[in-house]
Each structure stands twice: as C-alpha cells, then as structure tokens.
Amino acid sequence: MKKILLALLFISIHFQAFSQNQYLVLFKDKANTPYAVSRPKEFLSDRSIKRRVNQNIAVTERDLPPNPSYLNEIAKTGAKVLYKSRWINGALIETDAITLDKVLKLTFVKGLEGRGDIRNTRQNSDNQTTTTKDKFGLEGINDNGLSQTQLAMLGADKMHQKGYHGEGMLIGVLDSGFLNANQLTFFKDLFNEKRVISTWDFVDNEANVYNDHNHGTNVLSCMAAFEDSRIVGTAYKANYLLLRTEDVFSETKREEANWLFGAEMADSVGVDVINTSLGYNVFDNPAQDYKYSDMNGDRALATRAADWAAQTGILVVASAGNEGSSSWKYIGTPADADSIIAVGAVSSTRNIASFSSYGPSADGRVKPELSAQGASTIVGNTNNTVGTSSGTSFSSPLMAGFVASFWQAFPKLTNMQVREYLIRSASQYDSPDTRVGFGIPNFDKAYEIAELEVLIAELKKSGQEVAVFPNPFSDPQGLKVWVLKDDAGQNFEFSLVDISGKPVWNLSSKEKKITLPIFKDDLAQAVYILKVTAENLSFTTKIVKN
C-alpha cells in the first residue's frame, strides 16, 4: 500500500509539473526596442494617432510594444506566447511549472502579474470537477416593448432629432460574444453599411465573435440597433469594434487579462468610446478574490487598464454592477477606475434599481458617476425578437452610445471634457449619492454647457475681451455677459443704452460672469448698445432684441 501511495504521489507531482497553465509575465523595461515614440505608425493606426493629437496627448513609452527579442527568448524556453501587452509591458504565456521557472530566471523578466496561474478555476470539493456558471443568467429577456422611454430619459431622442446618431464615431464593445448579431434585422443597417470595422475573440483566439454568447448581442442592441417602431439604439449610426473578452462559464484572472488586451486593441485601431458591461470581484479561485478595499482605482488589472485607456483619449463607460442586493453590494472592477464613467441603473420612472451596485469607490470617490435605464431596458435578442432585460449591463451601453453621439456634436472636446459636461448636466449634480451618482444626464443641458464653453474658449483664444450671448436675445432669456480678459479688474459696470444713448439698464458687480435680468416685455425690438467697463477694461458692442 505504501508503494502504491508513493507512486500516486509521484504521478500527481509529475502531472502538476507538466500541466499547462497560463501566466501574465512582466518585463523590467523596453530597453533596445526597435520601436520609438517618434514612429507611432508602426504600432498605432492613423485614427489612434489622430485621437491623441486632437486631445494634445503625447505618445509615450507605455504605448510601445514589448521588446520582440524578449518574446523570442520566452518562446525559446518552450513556453507559448498567447498575447502581448504594451501597457503592462508583458505577455500572456501558456506553459508548465518547470518551463515557467526557466522564464522567471530570464534577466529581463520582472515577475508575474497576480498570483500565479490566471486560468485557475474553482474545484467542487465533493467530486473535484470544475464548476461552471453563467454570470449573466439573471438578465433573461422578459417581454416586448419600444425604446422611446429609455431614449427620452437621457434626451437621446432630441439628440437624434438634432442630427447626432454617432456618425463618424468608433465604439469598442468588450463583452462575452455577439451571437447571431450579423443575422438580425435590427442590425441590418450596421452590417450592410459595413460599420463593424473589426472583431476579435480573445477567449478562443479567432476572429469570429458571432457564435458564442448572447450577452454582447443584447448589449450592442442598446447602442447600434435600428428598426423603426421596434428598437432604436443611442448611437445607431456609429462604427463598432466587437471584442469577446469574457468567458461566461468561468470567472478567472485570464478574463481581466483579456480585458487589458481588448482595451489595447481598441486603442490601437482608434476607438473613441469603450463600453464594457463586465465586472469582476469574485473568482473561481478564491485566493484571487478582490476585497472592497481593492476597489480604489489603482489595484485591479482591469481598473488600471481602463485608466490607461483613458490616458490615450478614450472615454471608457462601464457597468457599475448588479450586486446591490448581494452581500458584496459594491461596484467591481473596472467600474472603480477614476477616469471613466461607471453607470448605475434606474427604472423607467427614474427610481433606483435594487440590483444596481453601490458606491463609493474604496477611496471615497463618487461611484457610479451617472445612471440610465437598466431595469426593464429594451434590448434586441439573438432570435430577432425585441424584449426587456434588467442589469447595469444595459444602462452602460445606453450611456456609451449617448456619450459617443454627444461627442459627435463637439469633436474638438477631450474625453475628460465630455465626461465633465455630462456629469454637470446630470439630475443631481449638486447632491450625488452612492446609488445613481450625479444622476441621469440630459442632452439639452449638456449641449448648452458644452456649446457655451466651446464658444468662450474660441473667443478667448481669438483675444476677445467680453463674450455676450445669446445675441440676438429675446425676453424670456437672460443676457449672459462673461468678461474674458484676465486682468480686466475687480469692479465691473454693465450698462445697456438704446441707439440714441438713452439708458435702459445698469448694474455694478464684482463678478466676471453674470446673467443680466430679464428685460421688460415692452422693450422694443431694436438694436441696443451694451457697455462693460472696469479698471482695465472698456468694451462696447451692439446687441439685438428680437
């Protein structure tokens, strides 16, 4: 019996030594790389470079691919290189424990990201077989409906009427697969117009993303679907990059690594907005679970990747999570990232959805930042039906499409300006909470804020000392007057006279930005003269009363 036990022990050790696992290997540097920040076209698309130029973002060493000689040396050990990462400066490899030891002894290897094998799965203690689960099982389709309510909640219907449907924008979608998406009538325009620019499946290492799982299809419909009287997405004229990063039947660190690879691909092809209706906090290997204290914007791999994406000019939109009624209850990664928009869920009547995950982040930041309809959201299904489903998985893409179409209206804005204006437009901007954050954004209000500040920036850049708007004006509107000259003084006189010089109105103020009172109803339609003076300012302009 003792010999049998020893033999079994030897077999077990031998099996573990030569079993193939996956590891995220980190490199110490990018020394002697053949790539250079001065030649970005060797590793970034023209669109990616243009996005950086438009936002005054420099190409940095982080953007450089890992040194090819390092990858070659790893391959010589017998390890298989699956994917490489620019941002983390490393590679995902598949190998056994003995070969891994050789890899870790290479002089340029820094170590491993995470705790060893990132593909470990939880073992059932009764029969030692691997357990599987579908993390999106609670998000089933329920009944039929139309999209108007969820669009109108954001003002997306008015946005569409104004001519912004996402034209020219590129949205990257990181999800679990897009089953049958290329065969559905509500995506007919998307595919006929060849607006899916590329696809990749990081789980199965192939281009086909249409044969795996329904969740990404449901998510995509919130943005890209268009079928009159059935379903309308928030950015149904945008271009899309479809990436499968999630394996629904496991929950491993490999999926976080896939998220990193997907975000890097999205950057390299030039996406403007990323939607990710994915979140992580508990893994099949309990040793890899996150704690709430890890949701601090710096710890998790997907969180760091989301912030790196933001630093390239991409606006990342992430679901807050569906843990509001669970013992965890908080947001997961990458929703805790500090330069993105995490999205909570509300009902069609704007009430908080009970399942929507709580903020704040572990370091006290407002989370989620914004919210949209995530309870009984209208989605398209893989069998070509239209129904409702619930989850922040759907409030997030509604928001992502909204973000892209809003950004289309102001293409010179940076990603952080777009984020700021939408937050400032939100329903409870002055009193954010831990469930819906700053609240539900509003297109009209965000558009007004952005239009005004873009105008002010352009006027100031041209050297104009005072901005006056709207001009012409009408009675219900206050006339806004902003002093742009930095050294104008501290005591301002604002006066309005008619064309003959007769005084109509006068105000003294220490404020540079004021809204003059509403004019009298009987103020004649005419041309008036506005004068603004201060210690170092004398400004006069004509304004027109309609």
Image (cartoon, rainbow, N blue to C red):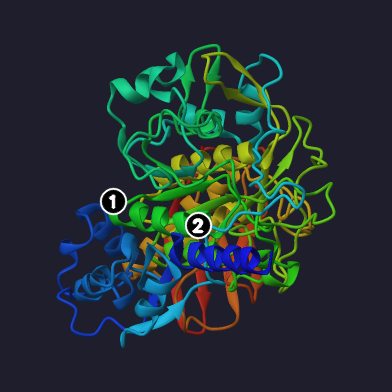
Residue appearing at x 23%, y 75% in the figure: 73
Q: Where 223 falls versus 275 (above or below)?
A: above
Res 87 quadrant in image: bottom left
Amino acid beneath label 2: Arg
**Residue 186 x %, y %:** 46, 17
Q: Is residue 39 left or right of residue 377?
A: left
Front position in the image: 509 or 113: 113
Q: Is residue 183 left or right of residue 353?
A: left
| Disc nearest the viewer among 1 and 2 | 2
Instruction: State the separation of the CA atoms marked 1 and 2.
Output: 23 Å
Residue to which mark 1 is pinned: 269
Residue 405 visible here: yes
Q: Where 292 falls versus 51 (above or below)?
A: below
Front position in the image: 91 or 373: 91
**Residue 539 x %, y %:** 43, 69
Residue appearing at x 69%, y 38% in the figure: 391
Amino acid beneath label 1: Val
Residue 545 visible here: no
Q: Residues within 10 Å of mark 1 (few under 14, many from 20)?
A: many
**Residue 524 x %, y %:** 56, 39
Residue to which mark 2 is pinned: 254
Q: Residues within 10 Å of mark 2 (few under 14, many from 20)?
A: many
